[in-house]
Amino acid sequence: MPRLLIVHHTPSPYTQEMFEALLSGATAPEIEGVEVVRRPALTVSPADMLEADGYVLGTPANLGYMSGALKHAFDMCYYPCLDSTRGRPFGLYIHGNEGTEGAARGVDSITTGLGWVKAAETVVVSGKPSTADIESCWELGATVAARLMG
Ligand SMILES: Cc1cc2nc3c(=O)[nH]c(=O)nc-3n(C[C@H](O)[C@H](O)[C@H](O)COP(=O)(O)O)c2cc1C
């Protein structure tokens, strides 16, 4: 069964709301035949990455970049995944007020190196997620998961 891996750094209630909406979309009843696995970014292994068929990445903006946790995940997994995960779809959500562009740019640069294919627009949320923000996170999860349906 195709597997979607959610790699997320979730340090606060607002980021938890985004994560839960994302997960809800990825596991919606209309998504059939896709296994959804979630891993906090500080715990994800190269094996987790290799065994997945697509990815959703979630991070706050930290110091104008992706969180150290998500960067750590890439530091651990980049070379083990290189050339083995090329062409796989991914999505990205970011929470922050300033520097979210730097976070997006960093992820885009690394995923370009890996040869991953962006399957949906990046979702960027500031402050308390609005109803529309929550819907965007849900859509992101559903869209990337739907790409993996047989
Ligand atoms: C070390 C550190 C650096 C941070 N840098 C930024 C930053 O550059 N821009 C920003 O908007 N928020 C920054 N934040 C705040 C986080 O992005 C924020 O906690 C996260 O988006 C979740 O939001 P919340 O705490 O309001 O739920 C930083 C937080 C930490 C711990």
Image (cartoon, grey):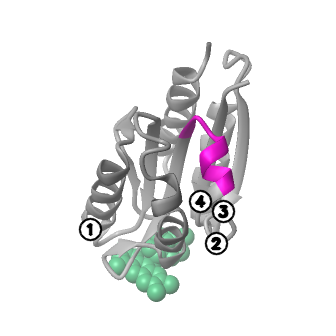
Q: Residues within 10 Å of mark 1 (few under 14, many from 20)?
A: some
Quadrant location of residue 26? top right
Quadrant location of residue 31? top right
Residue at 63% x, 40% y: name it. 52
* Residue extending farthest bottom: 63
For label 4, the residue is: 8
Instruction: Look at the numbered disc 4 and give the secondary structure of its residue.
Output: strand
Amino acid under disc 2: Leu
Count of numbered badges drawn on the protein: 4
Report how far apart the C-alphas of labels 3 and 4 lie in the structure.
9 Å
Report how far apart the C-alphas of labels 1 and 2 lie in the structure.
20 Å
Residue 134 percent coordinates (x, y): 54, 43
Amino acid under disc 3: Val
Q: Is mark 1 within 8 Å of ligand 1?
A: yes
For label 2, the residue is: 42
Task: Name the disc covering residue 102, or none.
Answer: 1
Amino acid under disc 4: His
Q: Quadrant of the C terminus?
A: top right
Contact between labelled residues 4 and 3, with CB atoms less than 8 Å apart? no
Report how far apart the C-alphas of labels 3 and 1 lie in the structure.
23 Å
Among the two numbered marks 4 and 1 on one chain, the one whose residue lies closer to the N terminus: 4
Report how far apart the C-alphas of labels 4 and 2 lie in the structure.
9 Å
Q: Quadrant of the N terminus?
A: top right
Please state the extent of the stretch shown in magenta in the rendering.
47-54
Task: Name the disc covering residue 44, or none.
Answer: 3
Relative to 129, say whether 98 is above or below.
below
Among the two numbered marks 4 and 2 on one chain, the one whose residue lies closer to the N terminus: 4
Residue at 59% x, 55% y: name it. 7
Which mark's residue is nearer the viewer, 1 or 2?
2
Which mark's residue is nearer the viewer, 4 or 2?
2
